[in-house]
Image: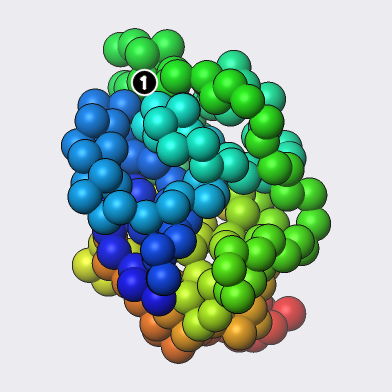
């Protein structure tokens, strides 16, 4: 299985001429992404949406229309995908809240809109397996970053969108609608059986690295709490 960053938030995974795209970057990147896909000359079977924020859905419809790939999305965000609009979540610290608010004040419509997806979409409501050749794709609902965030595991690789970041030493997402669910979502990724994590933003991480980061963040908190009790 070859796995590469296509452009922006988009990853491409393929083997024996068949492939899946995971997320689809910004609208402004769609022509370049289409050119790169054409060069790879693969039969694109699915566009797996980890969630529907504008920076992940920019070229979804353009690539679907060009390739005939089926679009897969968390059921709770299917309506967003059909409308071409998903609210951007709150920042998880003061700095990103300020940036988020500034974005909303400037031009929320422009930022949060993308081309609506036409055609049928495959909805993920619970753990589901999709087949691609001899390979299985396990869809794992994660939530936390957005109501319909989904992780997709293919063999030892898991694509997680913005539930995990991979920017320098930062793994904690800068934005989340349900911050209180991040620990459980990280737990589901750690228990998924994957070894490598592919975030929407940043570099590939090992599951072991996320386990250490989770333990640092949450186990030390629970120790502090138990001391207080
Ligand atoms: Zn996002
Ligand atoms: Zn993102």
Instruction: Determine the residue located farthest toward the right in the rendered image.
Output: 126
Give left or right: position of 35 versus 18: left
Give left or right: position of 103 versus 18: left
Q: Quadrant of the N terminus?
A: bottom left
Query: Which residue appears at 44% of the width and 52% of the height?
Result: 43
Q: How many marks?
A: 1
Please state which of residues 142 and 59 is positioned toward the viewer in this rendering.
59
Q: Secondary structure at mark 1?
A: helix
Residue 174 lies, with reference to residue 3, above or below; the image says above
Residue 118 lies, with reference to residue 207, above or below; the image says above
User: Residue 143's x, y, as percent?
Assistant: 65, 51
For residue 17, what is the image quadrant? bottom left
Please state which of residues 44 and 107 is positioned toward the viewer in this rendering.
44
Q: Is residue 123 visible?
A: yes
Query: Which residue appears at 47% of the width and 75% of the height?
Result: 157
Residue behind label 1 places its C-beta within 8 angstroms of ligand 1: no
Residue 67 lies, with reference to residue 110, above or below; the image says below
User: Residue 70's x, y, as percent?
Assistant: 59, 42
Please state which of residues 212 and 57 is positioned toward the viewer in this rendering.
57
Give left or right: position of 142 versus 154: right
For residue 57, what is the image quadrant? top left
User: Residue 172's x, y, as percent?
Assistant: 42, 61
User: Residue 53's x, y, as percent?
Assistant: 47, 35
Query: Which residue appears at 52% of the width and 42% of the height?
Result: 69
Please state which of residues 229 and 177 is positioned toward the viewer in this rendering.
177
Q: Quadrant of the C terminus?
A: bottom right
Residue indicated by mark 1: 111
Mark 1 residue crowding within 10 angstroms, few (<14) / some (14–19) / many (20+): some
Query: Which residue appears at 52% of the width and 19% of the height?
Result: 116
- The image quadrant in which ligand 2 is located: top left
Question: What coloring was used for the rendering?
Answer: rainbow
For residue 77, what is the image quadrant? top right
């Amino acid at each position: 299985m070859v796995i590469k960053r296509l452009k922006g938030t988009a990853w491409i995974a393929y083997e024996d001429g068949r492939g899946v795209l995971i997320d689809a970057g910004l609208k402004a990147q769609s022509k370049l992404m289409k050119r790169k896909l054409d060069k790879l000359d693969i039969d694109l079977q699915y566009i797996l949406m980890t969630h529907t924020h504008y920076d992940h859905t920019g070229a979804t419809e353009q690539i679907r229309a060009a390739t005939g790939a089926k679009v897969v999305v968390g059921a709770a965000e299917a309506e967003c995908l059909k409308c071409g609009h998903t609210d951007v979540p709150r920042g998880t610290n003061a700095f990103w809240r300020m940036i988020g608010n500034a974005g909303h004040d400037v031009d929320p419509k422009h930022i949060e809109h993308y081309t609506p997806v036409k055609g049928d979409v495959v909805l993920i409501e619970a753990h589901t397996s999709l087949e691609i050749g001899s390979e299985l794709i396990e869809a794992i609902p994660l939530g936390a970053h957005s109501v319909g965030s989904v992780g997709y595991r293919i063999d030892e690789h898991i694509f997680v969108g913005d539930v995990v970041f991979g920017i320098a030493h930062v793994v904690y997402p800068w934005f989340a609608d349900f911050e209180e669910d991040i620990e459980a979502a990280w737990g589901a990724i750690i228990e998924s059986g994957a070894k490598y994590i592919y975030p929407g933003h940043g570099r590939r991480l090992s599951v072991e690295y996320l386990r250490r980061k989770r333990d640092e963040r949450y186990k030390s908190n629970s120790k502090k709490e138990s001391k207080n009790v």
